[in-house]
Image (cartoon, helix red, strand yellow):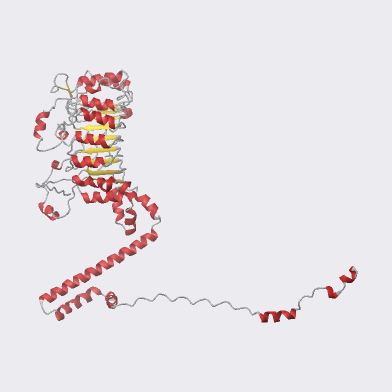
């Protein structure tokens, strides 16, 4: 068969199915319809109202509940109560029922407010916690009681990294301190406690921060009935155990503490303070004011436990009477705390050779304050400006050092003019009673002609120099003063002469705004218009009028 016959032969062609055959095929395999959707689940049944619910619903539906309740309760007492005891029992039950209803309404109101706050507050919880961590402690407490959402955010440990519970009147007790330290845990970095009477009033001043409860000034308006009304309430006084939470939990809260400031906690003792310092190995800044603790034991504890400390500020509660510091203690402190750059020992009985060990030993020392110190003559400054311990000194404050000699100050000024103390920027040698003479410190110098003050101001205009002395003698016998203050326990500067003299103050214009108490942790001004009262018993209470 040829090719032409193959192409035109119908038998060789494949047959396509006829369209009429498709219905037969579909009828043989019918298509199943999709299953119907499941019926929707019925809503959860509303719980049936019990008898109390019906009663409360009827009770709340009263148009004028006050009048209706009054009349109904009176009729109930008259008809149901046959004796006084029955009437008293009904009244007590009514009071309990009303109190329960009031508490339920308040609780529901708080829930609605919290739900509203959580919906309307624009920040998520993590950012809210971040904002709260930037607040001071008092503001954080106010925020925590605003609503349950804020309270939950305010409990985060990061919000308590910097705890500041200093006040102008005693209103913080050990329980408050313990709660906040435990909330902070290992996040605690700064802790400030105690009574701070007020700010430093003027640049260059050496106003003591020590404040005793026996310094009360006016008790004429005090009512003992007010005190009796407070009996039985928890005391608002910090005691020696206020720092014990730092030691608890294997010392976890104090392990990362960087700053510890304690002000006028009169019941603090050496054992409690040294125990707290032993739990703070990372401490960098320690400020102690007005505590009845010994200088030597405190420095020994710092030397043994706080090897990274950079700033030490210690003001005595009994000016001129703490003579506990020994030379070995100074040497140990210099060897074990090499990073110290700021040292303030105010109101202690210090000797020049001990002070020289400290000032010359610390190689990074820049700030020195020995104000109101007893027994310092100034001889420790000899040949100090060119040594490793004094060439970095920027601030030197020797205000109201009763034994500071005129001749030693003159030698110091001469060394400054010769090129020593190149980094010095602030110097304060002011004295309310004048400088001591060379032969007898009872002989005071009020207008020295041997100290080249004007020459120093001319050749070193970068130095802020404060040299304020009275125009005439007003010296008070210090020994007699110390004897008279054995019972009063009032710090010495508060009893020195309070006259306002036409003092000769020399201040360079470039540094006239320098604050001699910089970095003391009391920059925030506080209102000091308060009165503190003392009770004769060991328990002391405080009232704000």
Side of 12 where 326 appears, left or right: left
Residue 20 x %, y %: 74, 81
Residue 261 x %, y %: 25, 41
Locate residue 495: give its quadrant: top left
Residue 95 x %, y %: 19, 70
**360, 6: nearer the viewer:** 6
Locate residue 367: give its quadrant: top left
Side of 40 where 303 appears, left or right: left
Residue 135 x %, y %: 33, 48
Residue 151 versus residue 200 in the image, above or below:
below
Side of 454 where 477 appears, left or right: left
**359, 395: nearer the viewer:** 359
Q: How many marks?
A: 0
| Residue 172 visible in rendering | no
| Residue 121 visible in rendering | yes
**444, 85: nearer the viewer:** 85
Q: Residue at x 33, y 52 (%)?
A: 156
Residue reaching furthest front?
1
Q: Residue at x 23, y 29 (%)?
A: 330
Residue 298 versus residue 160 in the image, above or below:
above
Locate residue 27: give its quadrant: bottom right
Query: In the rendered image, which quarter contains the N terminus?
Result: bottom right
Residue 412 versus residue 203 in the image, above or below:
above
Q: Residue at x 12, y 38 (%)?
A: 489
**276, 443: nearer the viewer:** 276
């Amino acid at each position: 068969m040829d090719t032409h016959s193959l192409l035109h032969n119908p038998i060789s062609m494949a047959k396509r199915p006829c369209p009429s055959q498709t219905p037969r095929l579909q009828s043989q395999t019918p298509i199943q319809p999709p299953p119907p959707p499941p019926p929707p689940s019925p809503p959860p049944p509303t719980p049936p109202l019990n008898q109390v619910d019906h009663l409360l619903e009827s009770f709340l539906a009263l148009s004028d509940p006050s009048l209706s309740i009054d009349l109904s309760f009176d009729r109930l007492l008259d008809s149901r109560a046959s004796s006084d005891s029955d009437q008293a029992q009904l009244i007590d039950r009514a009071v309990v029922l009303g109190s329960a209803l009031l508490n339920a309404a308040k609780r529901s109101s708080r829930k609605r407010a919290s739900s509203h706050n959580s919906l309307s507050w624009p920040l998520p919880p993590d950012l809210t916690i971040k904002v709260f961590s930037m607040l001071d402690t008092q503001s954080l407490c106010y925020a925590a009681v605003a609503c349950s959402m804020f309270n939950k955010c305010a409990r985060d440990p990061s919000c308590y990294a910097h705890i500041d519970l200093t006040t102008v009147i005693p209103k913080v007790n050990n329980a408050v301190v313990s709660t906040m330290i435990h909330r902070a845990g290992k996040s605690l970095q700064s802790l400030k406690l105690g009574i701070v009477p007020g700010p430093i009033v003027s640049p260059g001043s050496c106003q003591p921060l020590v404040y005793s409860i026996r310094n009360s000034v006016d008790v004429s308006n005090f009512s003992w009935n007010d005190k009796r009304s407070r009996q039985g309430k928890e005391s608002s006084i910090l005691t020696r155990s206020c720092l014990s939470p730092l030691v608890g939990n294997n010392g976890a809260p104090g392990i990362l503490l960087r700053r510890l400031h304690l002000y006028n906690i009169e019941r603090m003792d050496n054992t409690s303070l040294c125990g707290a310092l032993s739990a703070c190995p990372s401490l960098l800044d320690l400020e102690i004011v007005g505590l009845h603790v010994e200088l030597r034991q405190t420095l020994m504890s710092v030397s043994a436990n706080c090897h990274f400390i950079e700033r030490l500020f210690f003001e005595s509660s009994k000016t001129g009477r703490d003579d506990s510091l020994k030379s070995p203690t100074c040497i140990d402190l210099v060897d074990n705390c090499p990073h110290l750059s700021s040292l303030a020992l105010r109101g202690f009985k210090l000797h020049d050779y001990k002070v020289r060990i400290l000032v010359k030993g610390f190689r990074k020392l820049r700030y020195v304050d020995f104000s109101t110190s007893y027994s310092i003559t100034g001889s420790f400054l000899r040949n100090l400006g060119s040594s490793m311990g004094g060439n970095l000194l920027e601030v030197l404050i020797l205000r109201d050092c009763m034994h500071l000699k005129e001749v030693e100050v003159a030698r110091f000024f001469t060394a400054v003019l010769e090129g020593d103390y190149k980094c010095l920027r602030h110097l304060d040698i002011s004295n309310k009673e004048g400088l001591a003479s060379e032969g007898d410190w009872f002989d005071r110098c009020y207008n020295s002609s041997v100290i080249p003050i004007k020459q120093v101001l001319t050749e070193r205009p970068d130095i802020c120099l404060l040299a304020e002395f009275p125009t005439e003698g007003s010296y008070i016998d210090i020994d007699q003063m110390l004897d008279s203050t054995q019972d009063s326990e009032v710090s010495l500067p508060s009893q020195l002469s309070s006259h306002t003299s036409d003092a000769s103050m020399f201040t360079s214009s470039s540094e006239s705004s320098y604050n001699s108490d910089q970095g003391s942790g009391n920059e925030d001004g506080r209102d000091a218009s308060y009165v503190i009262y003392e009770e004769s018993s060991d328990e002391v209470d405080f009232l704000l009028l």
